[in-house]
Image (cartoon, rainbow, N blue to C red):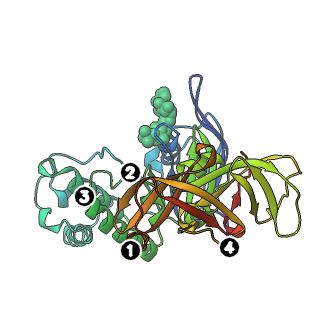
Amino acid sequence: MSEPLVTFRNVEKRFDDFVAVRDMSLDIHEGEFLAIMGSSGCGKTTTLRMLAGLEAPTSGEIRIGGRLMNDVKPHERDTPLVWQSLALFPFLTARENVEFGLKMRGMAAAERKRRALDWLERMQIEAFAERNVATLSGGQKQRVALARSLVMEPRMLLLDEPLSALDANLVIRMQGVLTRLQRELGITFVYVTHSQSEAFAMADRVVIMSQGDIAQIGSPKDIYRAPANRFVAEFVGRNNILSGTVGETGGNGLHIDTPQGRFVAHMPETVPAQGAEVSFTVSADLVTLSLTEPEAVNKVQATLISEEFIGSVVTLFFEGADRLEFKVQMQERALLELDLEPGSAVWLSWEAENANILEDN
Ligand SMILES: Nc1ncnc2c1ncn2[C@@H]1O[C@H](COP(=O)(O)OP(=O)(O)OP(=O)(O)O)[C@@H](O)[C@H]1O
């Protein structure tokens, strides 16, 4: 693979005694869409600000295109940042804001106007081109800010919650617009968000951060199907997490004894010793629900507690032995055929290959 565009090597950022980013090592490749996700205060924005040159790392190295960037000022970089609270010029129109950078580069008036209008149109706000930005809504301003950065066709764009002020429908539309543009233009996107659906829908790779550390880096599918640790498993998606001790190994997989019964998981690359404590996850959409006892290796009896509908997908919450919560996700249509109500007793089952052993508990 070619040299990464960006490398973080053992980067730490401290504010006095507080460690906001700890020993971060990360490569970002040219043309990649990388999302950084995590709960509030985990260090996402600090990471992005270091990349933009707005904060200097306390230790470690950040390189862009091979060049050491630790002390390079923001204006000497080709890495514009689109913020939650964006610094548009309030006394200019939307179009003038978008044109600003091109004007600074000395582009002729007609050409920069054409380009600014083109980008405002792509962001679906051409109707507001001649309006003073101070009179625009938060979501309209966010799109002007995106147009203003994209019109410069930078090599890399840093985005901090750029869609946070938009309503749900517009978020989905803008996700489509941004991913298409990113692929077409080949710009490297580093995109900070606390929204899992946004990160997973758009990014090639997702970095999950927890209290200044990287908890996992991987494709959305890898992180969704094979969370590496309990933090990621709880943070991402609808995972069932079971814990127990390793029974005999070999044969058809790893046997794990838990308070809910003995289960079989497919053999992980590093086989834990007999008697070791392990946890494994099963995605809620990989659990099968039956009214009668199924012919399955892994099965539990459980009682329905509640249901949660999001669009046509429903998540069912069950209680199993030892009061463990189980989640099952299915299409609403399939649920209707089962005719369940709170208190209904069912069987839940899953394949051994869908049990993912956590690398650390
Ligand atoms: N200039 C600063 N001085 C002191 N502490 C800071 C400073 N900037 C950030 N921090 C602290 O560092 C931690 C990480 O902050 P950061 O803004 O990177 O979090 P985040 O993951 O982007 O959170 P959010 O999703 O809430 O924006 C927080 O605890 C924050 O209070």
Circle 2 residue: 161
Residue holding disc 3 = 144
> Label 3 crowding class (10 Å Cα cut-off): few <14, some 14-19, many 20+?
many
Quarter of the image where the N terminus is located: bottom right
| Residue type beneath disc 1 | Arg
Marks 4 and 3, how far apart in space?
A: 57 Å
Mark 4 → mark 1, Cα distance in angstroms: 24 Å
Give x and y (percent) for residue 126.
Answer: 17, 68
Amino acid type of the residue that numbered disc 4 sits on in the rendered structure = Glu
For residue 95, what is the image quadrant? bottom left
Q: Is the shortest distance between ligand 1 and the CB of mark 2 under 8 Å?
A: yes
Disc 2 versus disc 4: nearer the observer: 4
**At 53% across and 66% down in the image, what residue appears?**
285
User: Amino acid type of disc 2?
Assistant: Glu
Query: Considering only order in the chain, which callout, 4 or 2, is on the residue closer to the N terminus?
Result: 2
Residue 263 figure quarter: bottom right
Q: CA distance from mark 1 to mark 3?
A: 41 Å
Which mark, residue 333? 1
Tell me if the residue at label 3 has its CB under 8 Å from ligand 1: no
Query: How would you rate the neighbour count of disc 4 (Cα within 10 Å): few for under 14, some for 14-19, many for 20 or more?
Result: few
In the rendered structure, find residue 248 and report the number of the disc placed on it: none
Q: Which mark is residue 295?
A: 4
Which residue lies at the image location 18% right of the left edge and 45% below the top edge?
90
Q: Quadrant of the C terminus?
A: top right
Where is residue 122? Give x, y as percent. Answer: 27, 71
Q: Nearer the viewer, residue 340 or 245?
A: 340
